[in-house]
Structures are given as C-alpha cells and as structure tokens.
Amino acid sequence: MLESNTFVVREHVKFLTSTDTYDILDAASGELLGTAQEHVGGVVRLLRWFISKHIMPTRVEVREKPDDALVFTVRRGGYIFRSRVEVHDAQGVLVGYFKSKVLTISGGFTIYDNTDRHFADIKGKLFGFNYRFLTPDGKVEMGRVAKKLSAGAILKELFTSADTYAVEVSPDLTDEPMAKMLILAAALAIDMIYKEESRTVDIPGLGD
C-alpha cells in the first residue's frame, strides 16, 4: 500500500452502525489497496447512540489487501478540549501523533513524529475537504487532500460519493513510507475523528 503516492479514500454506506469503514484505492488504477475500519468496544459502541462519539475513544485499523495484513493503527483516547491522536505501525510502535489546536488562530492541527519533532501542519478547509500538509515553516507542500487529484490519471467513476476524496503525497516522499503513513493517517483522522469533533467544538484554522 505505501508504495503508492496517490490514494482514493471511499467511505462505505452506513446502515444501522455507529462505526466507519473506508476503502483505500490506488488513484491511477482503481485497484483496492486496503481498508480502514473503526473498532470500538461494545460499551462504547452502545453509548455512541446516545452520546456524541467525539468525546469517546476510538481505534482505526488500516489493513492491506489481499491478505488483510495490518499496516498501521490510528488511536485516540477520550476527548475533552484538545485531542491527541496517535499512529502506531503494525508492530505497535509509535510512528507519530496529531494534536488539534483548539482556541488558536493557527493551523487546525499539528503532526509530530515519534521523537516529538514538529513534522507538518495542516492548512485548508475542513468542510470542503481541501487542505494541505505543509512543512513547519510553511514553505514546502508535503501532500494534499481534495475532492479530485490536481494532476495525474484518475478514474472519475470513483468519485460517486460526497464521502470520497483523494490523498496525494509529494514525489519527494516516495521513498519515505513512514512519512506517507503519517499523511494518510492524518487524512483518515480528519474525516473519521476531527470532523466529528468540529460538529460540537470550533477548531479555528481549518478554515483559514
């Protein structure tokens, strides 16, 4: 999966479920590369029908086809004012983490690597699903998320749903799978986690 630089993320239609599942496809060929599926315990699953799920813990497993091998996991504990979302590799080792920037006028959230180094900032429009991953100095674009690819071949029929979007990683990161993992995980976190938080908590900067 992490050999690719462009992905299409497509949400499954929900039916009597409070959890999310996504297909991850190769943007050029449409080949199914893997899935991202949310996993929560029985008590949390039940409470989600009565309590906003943005305040409860969640875990998202990203698995690669055809053997469903685990690639990485996105985890978040309970949320009150500021969320920390962690990315762990298939062995459970921390790769990096994200922190939302509530009550600030800067970017919507920040990405750190496993040494606490500031890896990237997110800038863009959350609700329009168009945003960029920028180096901390804001000078280099490391990747982007949008409703369509800015360049390259894309199968138009993939974009049949409002919950389908493309993730592009800079060619400069082609040989850096950990960087790709953080960018793809961040895109999933925005849709599956931060979007939920924004319904009840204002996250300034994601609309900058």
Image (spheres, rainbow, N blue to C red):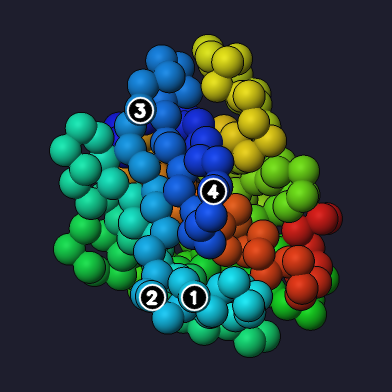
Question: Percent from the top left, x then y, of residue 108?
Answer: 70, 64
Point out the frontmost of discs 3 and 4: 4
Q: Earlier in the sequence, mark 3 or mark 4?
A: 4
Quadrant for the C terminus, please.
Answer: bottom right
Disc 3 element: strand
Q: Does the CB distance between marks 2 and 1 fall below 8 Å?
A: yes
Question: Percent from the top left, x then y, of residue 117?
Answer: 45, 70
List the residue tagged with mark 4.
15
Q: Which of the pair 203/169 is nearer the observer?
A: 203
Q: Earlier in the sequence, mark 2 or mark 4?
A: 4
**What whole-number distance in Å separates the C-alpha atoms at marks 3 and 2?**
29 Å
Point out the frontmost of discs 1 and 3: 1
**What whole-number distance in Å separates the C-alpha atoms at marks 4 and 1?**
15 Å
29 over 193 or under it: above or below: above
Question: Percent from the top left, x then y, of residue 192?
Answer: 56, 57
Q: Does the CB distance between marks 1 and 3 fall below 8 Å?
A: no
Q: Is residue 121 visible?
A: no
**What whole-number distance in Å separates the C-alpha atoms at marks 2 and 1?**
6 Å
Judge the density around disc 2: few (<14), some (14-19), many (≥20) Cα neighbours within 10 Å. Answer: few
Amino acid type assigned to the residue bearing label 1 in the image? Leu
Q: Which mark is residue 42?
A: 2
Amino acid type assigned to the residue bearing label 2 in the image? Gly
Amino acid type assigned to the residue bearing label 4 in the image? Phe
Judge the density around disc 1: few (<14), some (14-19), many (≥20) Cα neighbours within 10 Å. Answer: few
List the residue tagged with mark 1.
46
List the residue tagged with mark 3.
32
